[in-house]
């Protein structure tokens, strides 16, 4: 059952959350996606994650891992051998594409293919400006520090 959720009231009182609302709307849409290949997502720590995808039968050359800001795309394209005549074909060897939406500042740290499993390690690296830091509090009798000039005015020639 599909329910429509209206995010319009939230747009009136929130700024900069457009990406979150887009993710929510996209997740509510009925997507005609395959469950193949199966995968696991594991949180390994506060800012570390691991995605493991079962890609049995695919070689390293047949897999493509693409990282864009906020998106990880894993593609597999198995080369067909026209000479092979199957009596039964139970192993899926078709092409696939799996997309993973990533939070801000999450980047790919490493990727390995071993025993038919593609493992991708992700790590969130917050910039120094985004990390919590202490603010000095001046006493009532202390003078307020002069603001520092960040950029010098350019002189017209």
Image: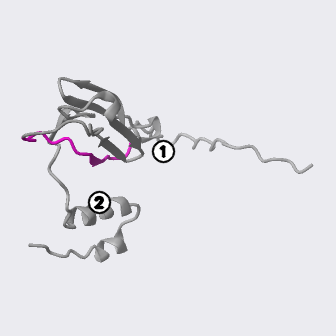
Residue 127: numbered disc? none
* Quarter of image, res 59: top left
Query: On the rendered structure, is 76 left or right of 132?
Result: left
Q: How much space separates mark 2 and mark 1, taking CA atoms?
A: 47 Å
The residue beneath circle 1 is: 140
- Reading the image, the residue beneath label 2 is 23
Query: 122 or 46, which is in the foreground?
Result: 122
Where is residue 5? Give x, y as percent.
21, 74
Question: Residue 138 location, x and y as percent?
Answer: 48, 40
Please give the name of the residue rendered at 92% of the width and 49% of the height, measured from the top-left corner: 157
Question: Mainly helix, strand or loop, the magenta region?
Answer: loop
* Region in magenta: 88-106
Above or below, comparing residue 58 to residue 6 in the picture: above
| Crowd rating for badge 2 (residues with CA inside 10 Å; few <14, some 14–19, many 20+) | few
Give the left or right position of residue 1, taking residue 22 as reference: left
Q: Nearer the viewer, residue 137 or 155?
A: 155
Question: Does 46 lie within the magenta span?
Answer: no
Relative to 29, residue 40 above or below: above
Residue 106 visible to an observer of this rendering: no
Disc with the residue nearer the chain's start (2 vs 1): 2
């Amino acid at each position: 059952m599909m329910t429509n959720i209206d995010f319009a009231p939230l747009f009136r009182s929130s700024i900069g959350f457009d990406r979150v609302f887009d993710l929510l709307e996209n997740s509510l849409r009925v997507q005609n996606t395959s469950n193949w290949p199966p995968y696991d997502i594991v949180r390994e720590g506060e800012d570390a994650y691991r995605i493991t995808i079962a890609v049995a039968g695919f070689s390293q050359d047949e897999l493509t891992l693409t990282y864009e800001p906020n998106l990880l795309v894993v593609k597999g394209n198995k080369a067909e051998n026209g000479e092979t005549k199957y009596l039964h074909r139970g192993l899926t060897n078709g092409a696939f594409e799996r997309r993973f939406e990533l939070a801000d500042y999450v980047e790919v740290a490493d990727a390995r293919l071993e025993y038919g499993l593609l493992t991708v390690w992700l790590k969130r690296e917050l910039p120094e400006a985004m990390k919590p830091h202490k603010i000095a509090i001046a006493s009532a009798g202390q003078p307020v520090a002069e603001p520092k000039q960040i950029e010098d005015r350019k002189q017209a020639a």
